[in-house]
Amino acid sequence: MEMRRTFGEWLKAVRKRVGLSHLELSRALGLINISTVCNVERGVNHIPDNHIMSYAAALKIDPEILAKMNMKAFDYTSYRILFEDS
């Protein structure tokens, strides 16, 4: 659970660094309200796969890094198999 919160805090910091409010990011993602963005930043929900590219574009970050961090926070077993086990 701690990894999820840490991921959310990192996303919040990135969002603020690029100067977007919750509402502005939600609109950039084509979302109707801000609850999805807020829940991701609180570590409650992951970023859905179909939003990784638009999230990365809005936050001006590498989508590969965002996808890996999202996976590490919410599907650590798969992350470990793909990226840490040799």
Image (tube, grey):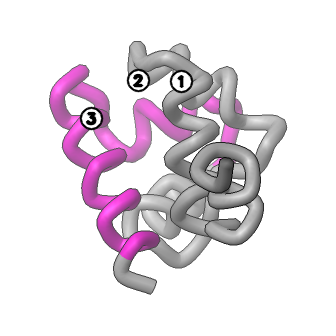
List x then y, in percent, for residue 66: 53, 35
Element at badge 3?
helix
For the image shown, how many numbered marks are present on the structure?
Answer: 3
> Horizontal placement of 18 versus 63: left or right?
left
Q: Are marks 2 and 1 in contact (CB under 8 Å)?
A: yes
Number of other residues with Cα within 10 Å of mark 3, as a class: few under 14, some 14 to 19, many 20 or more = some
Cα distance between the residues tagged 3 and 1:
10 Å
Residue kind at label 1, given as amino acid type? Ala
Q: Please identify the quarter of the rendering in which residue 61 is found.
A: top left
In the image, residue 49 lies at what x, y percent? 79, 43
Residue located beneath label 3 in the image = 14
Marks 3,1: beta carbons within 8 A: no
Instruction: Tell me the CA gap for discs 2 and 1.
Output: 5 Å
Q: Is residue 50 magenta?
A: no
Magenta span: helix, strand or loop, mainly? helix
Q: Which residue is mark 1?
A: 56
